[in-house]
Structure formats: C-alpha cells, structure tokens
Amino acid sequence: MEITEDNIVQQLRERNENGIAFIIHQYGSLLSGIIRRHVHYNPQELEECLDDVLLAIWNHIDDYDESKNTFVQWIAAIAKYRAIDYQRRMIRNEQRFVQGKGEDSLREERPPMTGPGQRDAAEVLAHLSEVERSIFDKYYLQGVPSAEIAAELQVKESWIHNKLSRGRKKLRQIFIPSAKRCE
C-alpha cells in the first residue's frame, strides 16, 4: 500500500517500517531544521537526535491524538523537545568537563589555532560591535529566536535580521579572502 500524508498515522500504527522512510523523505528537512535550532553546529549530535526523534515517533504513535494536533505539529513538537533535551545534555557534559579540569590546564591543552576553522566564537565575534556581538551570541550560540531578541531590545525583528546579515557579511570579508569568495 502506498503511504501518503493521509494514511501515515495508520501505517505507523500498523508498524509499517516504510512509514519512517516516508517521514524522512516528507518531513526530514522540517525535523532537521527544528533540531538544528537547538543542537548548534554539531552534525553528529544532530543526526543522533534525529534518530531519537524518529524512534520516539515510532514508539509513541499510539499516543498521537488527531483531535489535538495535526501529525506535522505532533512530530515537530517531539523534535523540539528532544532537541532541547540534547542541548541540555551537551551543556551538562561540557560543564562536567570544565569542572573536572582547572582553567589553566584547559588553556595548556588547547591545540594551537592555525586553520581558519579553528577560531573560537569569542575571537570571531570580537570583530563586531557590542550590539552585533550580543545579537550574534543570542541568536547563533544560545538559540534565542529573533523575535525574542527584538522584543528584548525593543526593536523590529527585521532590524535584528538586518544586523545578522550585515554582521555575517562583515565577518565574511574579514575571514574569507576575496579569492576564495569568488570560487
């Protein structure tokens, strides 16, 4: 039987494994985008979280109630909360690592920063103004939505996007030589 958006829930409840393939094909980019919002720049964690989301959908499909949400809203909520759990776990692990070692030993063990991909966020963001740095930190590193940042700074959301765009352009000009940008 062909799986469609109309019968995906039924197929999953009947334990048709092709339903998972359909979810990946149909909603994979949505789920990845939601997860990426919380699990920043870590492809391995992102992939592991996506696997967990798919497993949760498979294991809890009987809990889905059509009268409360659409299927897409339900799987998006699962993705969001699993991603938040992963983010918390990553922060917890990072804190354990830092507490387990002294600050001085961390500096000594840090490999020398030689390549362009080896810069840390503070070094890169130091090239921006204080306001831009704050916006970049909240949006890209903390995962705060642009609407919340705009409300906090009492500005329009479009202004936040404008600052992000101009900041990215500024950093691109500083860190990516013009010869590489033309390629």
Image (cartoon, helix red, strand yellow):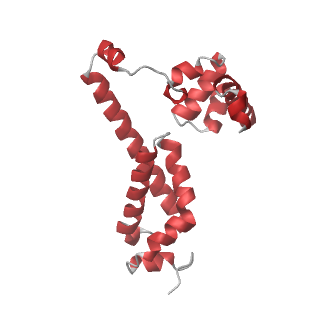
Q: Is residue 74 above or below residue 141?
A: below
Q: Residue at x 49, y 42 (%)?
A: 38
Q: Residue at x 45, y 79 (%)?
A: 11
Query: Residue 123: which quarter of the image?
Result: top right
Would residue 103 appear left or right of 47 to someone viewing this image? left
Between 122 and 158, the residue placed more toward the observer is: 122
Q: Residue at x 71, y 30 (%)?
A: 179
Between 156 and 163, the residue placed more toward the observer is: 163
- Where residue 142 appears, as percent x and y from the top left, is 51, 33
Q: How many marks?
A: 0
Q: Is residue 160 shown to the viewer in this render? A: no
Would residue 172 appear left or right of 32 to someone viewing this image? right
Q: Quadrant of the C terminus?
A: top right
Q: Residue furthest top?
A: 104
- Where residue 121 appears, as percent x and y from the top left, is 52, 25
Query: Residue 89: which quarter of the image?
Result: top left
Q: Residue at x 28, y 22 (%)?
A: 99
Q: Is residue 9 above or below residue 160?
A: below
Q: Is residue 120 above or below residue 29?
A: above
Q: Residue furthest bottom?
A: 1
Would residue 61 appear left or right of 71 to someone viewing this image? left
Between 86 and 81, the residue placed more toward the observer is: 86
- Where residue 88 appears, as percent x and y from the top left, is 38, 39
Q: Is residue 64 shown to the viewer in this render? A: yes
- Where residue 48 appears, as percent x and y from the top left, is 39, 52
